[in-house]
């Protein structure tokens, strides 16, 4: 099946620094990528939808300037957590779909996630 | 409000026994339902989906799920559990072009 990778798998940073997380589709072209956040014992929360070559669409309550998303190519999307603070500590997951439309009921392919800890 | 409930945090079952992981939903209109599995240190993997048609949906790794409109449920089942089925299972419903996720159920299959 289609494979999505994330890098790094875990990162620890100091408060006030910025962290970039990469999401790559390894064997397919992903026209749409999604970024999720998962808190312990909670469900996945969609943060934003990213289409290649266009600006990301953020969900209500997600700060665009805090969580910068770039989808520069059909195989790479990045999430940058700017000026990270301890409350940003979480598990960040990306997913990708091959569909040119956001929803054609095809399953999304998920990355393994990135554990961010902000000290 | 649209929601998905997985009433059990954890399900324990002996290897070879049938397993059921429960999911109920609340959405307006026709539901489009999904099951995903998350193995340790791996990304979520698609198991199966219900869009329309037969209420019994067959998916990967021998799993199946039954859509029950009257009970607003979409329980995941497998006739004979394997130790390798031990993982975290998520139910999700598509609503307004977005997936709404349950909290997940941890399945432990004991040898």
Image: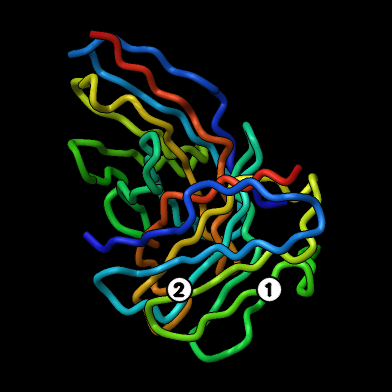
Q: Is residue B14 above or below residue A39?
A: above
Q: What is the CA distance from the residue labelled 1 to the residue labelled 2?
A: 23 Å
Position of the N terminus of chain A, as image quadrant, is bottom left
The image's mark for residue A103 is 2
Chain hosting mark 2: A
Q: Which residue lies under the disc numbered 1?
A: A68
Precedes in sequence: disc 1 or disc 2: 1
Q: Say if labels 1 and 2 share a chain.
A: yes
For the residue pair A107 and B66, the one nearer the viewer reads as A107
SS of the residue under disc 1: strand
Whether tag 1 and tag 2 are in contact, CB under 8 A, the answer is no
Closest to the camera, between mark 1 and mark 2, is: 1
SS of the residue under disc 2: loop
* A103 with respect to A49 (left or right): left
Alpha-carbon neighbours of circle 2 within 10 Å: few (<14), some, or many (≥20)? some
Position of the C terminus of chain A, as image quadrant, is top right
Scheme of colours in the image: rainbow
Q: In the image, what residue occupies the spot 79% across and 74% down?
A: A65
Q: Is residue B89 above or below residue A24?
A: above
For the residue pair A57 and B20, the one nearer the viewer reads as A57
Q: Is residue B39 above or below residue A46?
A: above
* B16 with respect to A34 (left or right): left
Chain hosting mark 1: A
Q: In the image, what residue occupies the spot 55% across and 69% down?
A: B97
Q: Is residue B58 above or below residue B106?
A: below
Residue B96 visible within the image: yes
For the residue pair A5 and B7, the one nearer the viewer reads as A5
The x, y position of residue B14, in whole percent, is: 27, 9
The x, y position of residue A27, in whole percent, is: 24, 71
For the residue pair A94 and A83, the one nearer the viewer reads as A83
The x, y position of residue A32, in whole percent, is: 46, 77
The x, y position of residue A20, in whole percent, is: 60, 65
């Amino acid at each position: 099946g289609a494979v999505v990778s994330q890098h790094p798998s875990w990162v620890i940073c100091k408060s006030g620094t910025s962290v970039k997380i990469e999401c790559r589709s390894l064997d397919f072209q992903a026209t749409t990528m999604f970024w999720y956040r998962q808190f312990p014992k909670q469900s996945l929360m969609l943060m934003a939808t990213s289409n290649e070559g266009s600006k990301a669409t953020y969900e209500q309550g997600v700060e665009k300037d805090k969580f910068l998303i770039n989808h520069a190519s059909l195989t790479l999307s990045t999430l940058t957590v700017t000026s990270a603070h301890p409350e940003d500590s979480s598990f960040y997951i990306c997913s990708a779909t091959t569909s040119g439309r956001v929803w054609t009921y095809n399953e999304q392919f998920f990355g393994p996630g990135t554990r961010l800890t902000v000290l | 409000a649209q929601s998905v409930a997985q009433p059990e945090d954890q399900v324990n079952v002996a290897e070879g026994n049938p397993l059921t992981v429960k999911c109920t939903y609340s959405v307006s209109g026709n539901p489009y339902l999904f099951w995903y599995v998350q193995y340790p240190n791996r990304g979520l993997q698609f198991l199966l989906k219900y869009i329309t048609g037969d209420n019994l949906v067959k998916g990967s790794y021998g799993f199946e799920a039954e859509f029950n409109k009257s009970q607003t449920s979409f329980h995941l089942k497998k006739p004979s559990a394997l130790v390798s089925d031990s993982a975290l299972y998520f139910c999700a419903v598509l609503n307004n072009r977005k997936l709404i996720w349950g909290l997940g159920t941890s399945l432990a299959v004991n040898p």
